[in-house]
Amino acid sequence: MGSGLEAAVGMSRKWDAREAGREVARSTIEKLNRPPDFFLLFSTIHYKNPNGFRDFLDGVWDVLPADTPLIGGTVAAFINNYGCFSRGVTALAVSYSNINVALGFGRNTKLHPRNAAKHCVNMIKNGLKTGDYGNKFLIDIISGPTVPNIPFMGRKNFVKSKVGGSFASSVGVRVFPLFGHGLGKEDDIVDYLTSLLSDYYFIGGSTLDTGDMFMNYQFIGEQVLKNSVVALGVDIDKPVFLDSMLGAHQLDIEFDITESIYKNRIITKIDDKPAKERFLGILRINEEQFNKLGVFYYKTSNYFPITFRGKEKYTTGVAGFLGDNIVLGHKARGQRVKLLSVTGKEVLNVVEKTFQNISTDFFPFVFMSTSNIFFNMLGEKVYSIKNKLDEYIKDIPYLLVSFATENAGTPADRAVTRVYSFNTLSVNSCF
């Protein structure tokens, strides 16, 4: 390209971890005329066996030029120029002369999210001390929630017993993070990142497995991490384009959180009634339907996230039930709650609305993040998203990854962590 900015997307579906790493790196950078200045790498969980992701990254570095800035992690699925995939690995590489790049990371996000975010920011700031092109963005990848292994109960985010639920709500949620499990606390991390990097555009999300929430991994350089945040800070001389849209609509149903604990992450009372009882009543679900938990989560609860009066850009959903208590994916941002609803049609509409009023002709690449629930909701019809992207983006290298939760924002509209959003990042190469 005349601007000198190049981008490429590659992938692999090989079962052998090291060979997959080699192929994804080779198929990406062979399209570039110069070494990449950063490399985004995503994999489904299928290399989780002992040393699997270590071998995978070793394969990547067999091909990738030494010291290439690299971050990534595990996702449930992805869509790129080649198709829709729930198994495999993919990468997006960018090469450009007028760019500065820095990596950052922080560990132990579930126990000390602010400390992890602070360590990450310090690395980014130190890495971008020299030069200032005036346009900055940050891609962050955060360890998502993992279901804890509860003694005598096993791995579960649903405790029927009121006594057991009360114990898990008061004691368990504080113990689980000591072992790297529990809520991802992505909202705390993103809040702190944005407070320290207020002049950055943000896009990112939290890693997961196939959706079971048993394990997830983050990549930075040659390291495979767990329970961490990794980030890529970019300073570039091209204007940054970022858009974030919510794929849900508000219903005429509201209720009050009248009691909560664990920094507003666990609801104990709704409208002065036990939270679970009242919430099921609002959704018109009886106990028998609720006990079929798979049906409840995938056919009912996931279709009804919540937001908060006066803070509608924040959304969250039900992460679990502990006795009479409801665990939220992210902390409540207010007392008055509005019920949202999501449909497959809205998922496609939000993709169309993102691109129908903009020209992508000067986009050298498009990186997108969205909710894994959208992919689950559409099932085999997820190819409809691919068709929409091909219609608007055409042959520009693009990558859409499905996260457990997403975050996006601009210097003028601060980034927030939420669910059921569709987020898009690029730069304008015509300037």
Image: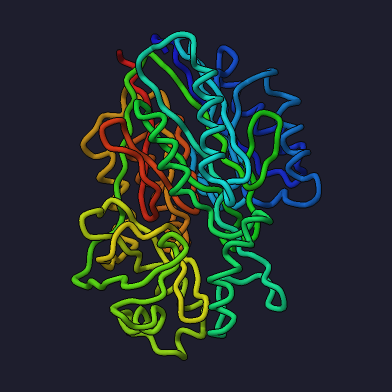
The structure's colour scheme is: rainbow
Total numbered circles: 0
Q: State which quadrant residue 1 falls in.
A: top left
Image: 325 above or below 314? below
Residue 197, position as x, y percentages in the image: 40, 29
Image: 306 above or below 208? below
Residue 363, position as x, y percentages in the image: 36, 25
Task: Report the residue that reaches farthest toward the left.
Answer: 252
Q: Residue at x 45, y 30 (%)?
A: 138
Position of 123 with respect to 255 (left or right) is right
The C terminus lies in quadrant: top left
Position of 35 with respect to 252 (left or right) is right
Q: Residue at x 36, y 72 (%)?
A: 259
Q: Residue at x 33, y 79 (%)?
A: 283
Residue 305, position as x, y percentages in the image: 35, 64
- Seen from the viewer's position, the closer of residues 357 and 52 is 52
Task: Report the residue that reaches farthest toward the right.
Answer: 50
Image: 143 above or below 106? below
- Seen from the viewer's position, the closer of residues 299 and 175 is 175
Residue 362, position as x, y percentages in the image: 32, 22
Q: State which quadrant residue 21 falls in.
A: top right
